[in-house]
Every structure is written in structure tokens, then in C-alpha cells.
Image (spheres, coloured by chain):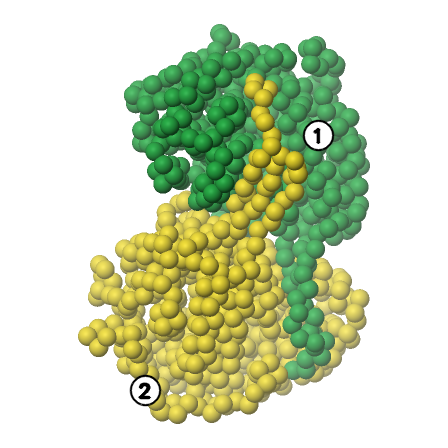
Amino acid sequence: MPSTFTHEFNASAFKGKVSFNTGLFINGQFLDGSDNTTIDVINPTNGKMTTSVSEGTPKDVDLAVDAAQTAFDTIWGLHAPGAQRSILMSKLVALMKKNADELAALEALDNGKTFNWARNVDVAGSIDCIRYYAGWADKITGQVQETTEDKLTYSRHEPIGVVGQIIPWNFPLLMMAWKIGPALACGNTVVLKPSEFTPLTAIRMCHLINEAGFPPGVVNVVTGYGNTVGNAISSHMKIEKVAFTGSTLVGRKIMEAAAKSNLKNVTLELGGKSPNIIFDDADIEQAVNWAAFGIFWNHGQTCTAGSRIYVQEGIYDEFFKRFMEKTRSLKVGDPFAPDTFQGPQVSEIQFNRIMSYIESGKAAGAKVEIGGERHGSEGYFIKPTIFTNVDPSMKIVQEEIFGPVCVVIKFKDEEDVIKQANDTFYGLAAAVFTQNLNRAINTAHRLRAGTAWINCVNSFNSNVPFGGFKQSGIGRECGDYALTNYTAVKAVHINLGHRM
Amino acid sequence: MAAKSIHTKLFGRALLSFPSRTLYRSSHTPSTMTSLSARIVIRAANRELEVPTGLFINNEFVPSADSPNDLIHLVNPATEENICSVAAGSVKDIDIAVTAARKAFNTTWGKNVTGFERSKLLNKLADLIERDQDILAEVESLNNGKPFKIARDFDIGDSIQCLRYYAGWADKITGQTIEVDNKTKLAFTRHDPIGVCGQIIPWNYPINMWAWKVAPALACGCTIVMKPSELTPLTALMLSKLIVEAGFPPGVVNTIPSLGSVGGAALSMHMDVDKVAFTGSTVTGRKVMEAAAKSNLKKVSLELGGKSPQLVFESADLEQAANWACLGILYNTGQDCTAGSRLYVQDTIYNKFVSLLVSKAKELVIGDGFDEKSGGGPLVSKTQFDKVWRYIESGQAQGAKVALGGQKRPGKGFFVDPTIFTDINANMDIVRDEIFGPVLAVGRFKTEEEAVSLANDTSYGLGAGLHSNDANQCMRVSSALEAGTVWINQYNLLNNNVPFGGKKQSGIGRELGSYALEEYTSVKAIHWNFGEKLDWPL
């Protein structure tokens, strides 16, 4: 029998008791893993155990896939009209709204992000995403192609079938919404693996999915490790599509597994080392605010983190002074305290990884202007860190750190900065700050990135596509673009009079 | 004969006589570079012509940079005689071609040229192919074996249409403007060309697959390194010459004949190729995708094998169903990824239909592609010939009944006659595997449910056909068939504006139609803040 997680929140931001079963969610039921093992969930503010949840195995993935296939063949997929799918998704939205504070509190507890951010971005964004795709469910259209009068040809955008979805720990609930929103709208059934570090909101969502009335097997959640459950999903012979958000290293393995197994379709949303470009003519106060938001929001654990800040020489000194002041003003601490901006990193592994990047930067001769060390004595807190005196060959300039660490670099002109900005094998996002219309457009167009922000950073919308150029990924999430990830196009040729 | 009636129906013009004797001279191959071209003789057409045999990089034919003595020897599959040899590109040659393509992308193509200009060049290319259609068809027939008239009127006729279709798209690539907040923010998307594309094409439709790949890539502004099949590279090289004549800037299209294990692998692994498109076997497609995953995560589209079912229901017009079924399995001598190689017939009409089918299949003449009577040519190579015969023998050994064919021809040429097996079961190799020859397995079913279940019992999902005069049944069955293309009361006819591609292990992505544009564009979302002030800290 899977254990029940019970917790009494008593913070000024949220008071209340939560209690729910933390089993695997297969065919509408909460189950123990087939090996009867569990995964400890650690509170990143103090390194202590919050609870433990059932651990899934490849065998459990098989069970989940069977349940998902049965649902697809009988009560979902082409058997559930778009209007019906839309109604169920809208019910889920209503339940998420009703439980929004609880979801935010769970996210803060599990991930370490502040309650306010969790409530206003993660939960609000997730609700918006599911609502947005609920609207698409009965608007999936193919084409009718004109050929000749003795032939009718049309394309149907059918659901793919059972889809595997593997999501990360940095925005646990939001990434679940980005994945299940379009998949369910298009009529697919889902086997989802949340991160083993942050499974709580995904499991809580399963209770809401049951409450909303989704048929059993439409959504299945198998909590587990990447090398067991993640690998089983990406190499499964009966899963026809896998969507993954996470590191480029793992994304590569998923695509390889897909190639070696059943050639399932793959979408990948991977890492980045996104440049943030500030020209002399930028609104300096706004540029400083957005730049700080770009790198330090979510503790730098954002795939689009603006981790390379390029500042034009005419504005550099003034920008740098103000950027330091701004960074100094950031409050690091308890995620439930109302004035906290930045909580702990998600895990000890991440903490160590980020600290080793900071050490490598120091060793390579870069200068730590602020931060560069842990905050406090317990938990996984790291002070916001700014490096200068860097050169392009340093690891801290080349590699994704996924922490509150940025490099600030001076540049001369447009040509110079575009070259530097594009000198990376990533291509997820980029930002430009300028008041000059031509420069804004020209720079945004020349940056090799799937998202270009002008006078803003890290600003997302459910209806705007998101994804990576180069090694930052394959495919686009959000917007109507995501519908193509979850539909299989079938061309139907009907002969009306062409005699052979 | 099947193809002839399609020909007259689709193209609506009388069969042309063979071209008169003219020499095919090139103004682009200097006479000093004789080693980069070969003279070949088309006996049936009384024609001698010069064909390029070098690697095509930066609008020039060049020898291999590091292995000039490595050659690929080409064989006429109807006679087993050598045609000529072409340069075999090396890994280094692929590198050089990619560098040329990258340079063109950054300077003269991609975002440096308007859609209107790309459109004009594509239309010009289509005009030139139309001008040279007879010569191209002769070489296609000589190298691949398919009948000359089919090569000209179907492979080439369709390729010209395909180029014109995408020429029309080149200045109609649009993104979206997305309403976000009218007071503070505008978002829009640009569908940028992806960049340098590697394209690896097969030997069954050398010109046609070239057009399917090149047309959408160029329309979107990508540059190309093309690897034609090592069995049939000649027409791709001839088309490369037309690329120069049409006026494409150097480096936009590069052609490297090479073995799959050399050039194909190098393209798939290349760190500076942004996308790879492959048409061929599922085994190789898997390797291409693995290489993409291991290298730079290039985008992949795959158009792979099939074991496509055709269902004949009792209400069907049996005469017509038999004609289409024959076209399904015998067109291109079965060397067709959508070949309708499994035919399931409702038991109430089974005997009648099978005898009709056998009598019609028997009428097809498989022979030399330059013989006017030939409706189908030889298989492309000795390897394919041996492979197909291994399947025919395995069908016999595993207990299927030979209703037609099954006997080897004496003499030269890789000819295989139409072969029909009945009394099959689901475990036989001839029912499970893609044979890629004129070999049909015929089974029977009682109910619609059973038919759909038999049809879907395969790891492939490329094509499927159904023959029925029950409208409701047509809708139910076409919906239930797991395939990227479903034909109702028809088979094997494609249209350039209708998407084509595979479900399950038959591929990833869609070619043709507006859908193919997605395979060659990279979406960039631009978020423009014009009114939101960020307070800090929040």
C-alpha cells in the first residue's frame, strides 16, 4: 500500500494541511512500485527528508503503457470527441484553481522556489496552459487538398497514441502542464515520468485528474529514476512518441534510444547558455532589472537563463554598478518568507555542480565580483554570483551552469556581439535591450535562438512557441506549434471516378 | 498495362516517340576535365552523350580531394554491362561540400536572398528539366532499369511539378503574429531556413526523390549537400549541371556520390549539418537518427520502409480493385516503399478475385526499359535480385502457395516476374518483411474487424489501401488503418500538395504539401516588450 504524505503548512503565505497518497498512478489507481521500493524526497532548505514516494520500475512502465494503450483504443483518442476532451481539461483547470495555493506550497517545499513565484508563475502558468489547450481540443484541423474532380484528398491530424513524457525538476508543475496540455488536447494518452527530485505536484495532479473525471489510463505517472523509468520510456516498443525536457546530455540518450527501438518521434527541450545583450541606448534601469531577473530568477535553474550578459562599452560602467547594487539587494532565504527572492538550489548534486563551476571560474582567472560561495550553513543555498574578466574559452562562458551564476562581458559593436552571442552550440534563447528599432530587429533576427526577447527576458506565453535551435532541442512547445508534436498526419486519397 | 492508362489519364497526352539522334553537349564541362565526365551510349535511342562523373561542389565538378582513385562502377541492370564510373566521395569531400554549403547559406542564400528570387530559380530549374526530360529519362532508365516512358512521364513529369509547386511556396513562407497584450507586448514568429541540410536519397526513384528533397529545402532557403544512391548517381549529377545553368549561386546545392557507410554516415554525423533528411530502409534510417543524436542533435526526417496492406471488401468493383492492386505491387517492379505487398480479400469473393488478379498480373511485361512493350524493368542490382529471390524461396519453403511466378528467367539482367503467393500465414517472412520486389502475399478475411487487425499487424505504417463501395465502411476503415497514407478505391498515386510519410517505424516527419515546409524551417519566437516595466526586486 503506497504511503500517504501528510504535511501541515504554517507559513504566513500559506497555512493548511495537505494529505495525499504518493503511489504510482496507473490506470486511475495509486499503486506501489513493482519492487516495493521508495524514493526519498528531500527538502532543499535543510537537506532533511520531507517524505518518500513509490519508486517505479521498467515493469511499472509496461503496466502504465498497457493502461494507456487500452484507454487510447477504447475511451480516448478517436473515441473521445474534442469537445469532451475540452470539457475534462476545463474541469481540471477549475480544480487546479481551487487548489492553487496548495500546489504552490507543495512546489515551494519540494523544489525550494519561493511560494510567491510558485503561485504567480508556476501554478498560474500551468493553469493558463491547460486552459489554452482545452480550447484547442475541438479545433484540431487537417487540410482538404484540391487535386482533381475525380479524387478527394484530405489530411487528418490523428492523435499519435501512447506518448511518453519526461519532465525536469526546475518547473515541475509547469513542465507537466506544457506536456500534458497539448497531448491530451490532441487525444493522446500519457505515461509521464516526473523528476525523482520533485515528484509531489505531479502526484497531487493525479488526484485532481481523477477528480476531474478523466477515464482511467489516459494519464499515468510513473515516478522514478532516469536510468530506469526514463530509459524504459524512451526505448519502449509501444510508445510512439517521447517528449523530454532536461539536459542536452540526456536528450541525446533519449534520441538514441528512440532510434534503436521503434523510431518513435522525439521532441527535446534542452539546455542553453543564453546571451543577454545590452546596447548603449537601452533604458538602463529596465535593462538592469531584466538582466537580474534573467539570470537569478528560479535560482538560475532556468533553461533560458540569461547567463552571458554582454554590455556595450559606452554603458558598461554604469550598468555594472547598478547591476551589482541590484544583485546585492536580492534576498536569499526561506521560500515561504514573503520577502525572499531566491531559495535554495534543488539538490545537493546541483549545489555541488554549481560550486564546482564557480571554482573552475576562479581557477581559470575570472574575477568574482559578488557571491561565489554558499549562503548560510544548511541547505543548498548559493549567493547570486557575478563573474568578470572572463574569456570565451572558460567553462563558465561555454557551459550551462544552471545556477545563479553569470558572466558580464564588454562588447564594441553589433557585429562583435552577434558573433560572441552565437558562439555556442546552444540556441535556446537570447535577449536584446535597445531603444533603436532597427538595431532591435536586426539583432533579434541574426541571433541563432528559438526565442528572442526584445527589452524583456524570461517572459513566456502559452500561445507563443518555445524551443531550441542547434543543440538546444528539436521541436516546439506551446502555441499551436505544439499540436504538431502530438498528431500523426494521415493523408486519405479517395478515388471518385478515376478508372484504371 | 497499368501504368499506361494512368499515364494517359494523368498527363493526357499521347506517348511520345523516342528522341531523335542528338548529342548531349555541355557548355559547363571544360574539355580539359575529361576525367570528370564520361561518354555513354544509349543504344535504343541511338544516342551518345556525355555525363558528369565528378563530385559537384560549389557549382563545379571536381575529383575527390583525397581519394581520386576511388570510383563507383555503375551497371545497367537490364544487361549487366558497365555504364561508366563516377567519383566516390570521401568523408573529406563531404566536409568540403558542407563548408561550401555553409558559406552559401551565410552569404548568397538563406536570409540573403528573397523568396521571390528563390522562386524564380526553382521555376527556371523546372523549365530546364522539362527541356532535358528525354535525355534524363534515358539515363534514368539505363541506370535504374525502369522503362524510359515511365521515367519521363512519371518520375520526371512529377519532379517538374514538384519543383514548380515549391517554387510557388518560396515567397509564401509565413510566421504568425501572436496577440499577447495589446498594451505591452507583441510576439511574432519567423520561420527561418534551418541552414545546411544533408539529404540522402535512394535508388528507386532517383530523380523524383531528388526533387522531393531539393524543392522544399531550396524554397525555404536552406543549402544542400546531397548524397544520391551509389547505385544510381548519374541523374543527380546531370541535375547538378542544370543547377548551374538555372543560376543558383555556388554552394547552394552540392552533390557527393558516395557509399552510404562513407558519405551517408559522414553527413549524419557532421557537426555542421543542421538537418538530415533520409529516404531508404528502416535499418539505415535508425543509424541516421542515432548518428544525429550522437553528434549535434541535428533535426531528422525519415521516410522508410513499408509492408503496406490492401483490403478488398465484397462490395468493391472487383475489376477495378484488381487493376489497382496490380499497380500497387507491380509498379516500379515492386521497388516502392508504399508497395501494396500484402493483399487481404474478403472470403465471399476470394476465389473470384484471386483468379482475376492473377490473370491481370500475368499481363504485365517485365523487360528492358527501352523496349516499348515493357511495363516494368529489372530490379536495380544483383544484390536486390538475390534478396528478392531469397524471399521467394523462403515463401515456398515456409509453405505458401505460388499462384503466379516463382520461376527464374534464363539469361542476363536482374529480371523478376510478377509473383503472387496465397495460403499465407502471419509468421511467414514474405508477410512480415519488406521485400522490395514484385512479390505479393494474398490472405483472406471474414469481417471488417479482422481485416483491420490483419492490416495493422506490422511494425510499419507507410501506406494502406482499401477497396469498397460502402461509404460508411470506407470512412471507418480508413480511420482505423495505421498508416501515413490511405488510398480508397485507388493505390500508389501521390500528389505534390498532399503530405506523405510514415507512422510507426515507417518514418518521422512528412514530405510534400505545405507540411514539408516544416521540415526545412526553424521557428524563432520574438517577444517584443514595449510597455511592461519590471519592478525590482519583485
Most foreground residue, B452 or A204? A204
Q: Residue at x 69, y 74 (%)?
A: A151
As measured in the structure, the alpha-carbon distance from the residue carrying label 1 to the one carrying label 2 is 74 Å
Q: Quadrant of residue A116?
A: top right
Vertical side of B375 occupied by A76: above or below: above
Instruction: Find chain B in the image and tell me its colour.
Output: yellow
Marks 1 and 2 on same chain: no
Q: Specify whether B305 is left or right of B56.
A: right
Secondary structure found at label 1: helix
Q: Position of residue B13 (x, y in %)?
A: 56, 87
Task: Judge by depth and name the residue closer to the eye, A175 or B386.
Answer: A175
Q: Chain of mark 1?
A: A
Report the chain holding disc 2.
Answer: B
Q: Quadrant of the C terminus of chain B?
A: top right
Q: Position of residue A298 (x, y in %)?
A: 55, 24
Tag shown at residue B23: 2
In the image, taking residue B442 as reference, residue B410 lies left or right, namely left
Depth check, mark 1 against mark 2: the one in front is 2
Category of crowding for the residue at label 2, using alpha-carbon neighbours closer than 10 angstroms: few (below 14), some (14–19), many (at least 20): few
Local secondary structure at mark 2: loop
Q: Nearer the viewer, residue B279 or A425?
A: A425
Q: Position of residue A282 (x, y in %)?
A: 47, 30
Per the rendering, the colour in which chain A appears is green
Q: Please state, as top left, top right, bottom left or bottom right, where the N terminus of chain B lies in the image.
A: bottom right
A396 in relation to B499, above or below: above
Amino acid at the residue labelled 1: Met
Residue B399 placement, left or right of B260 = right
Can you tell which mark lies on residue A205? 1
Q: Position of residue B411 (x, y in %)?
A: 39, 85
Q: Is residue A420 visible?
A: no
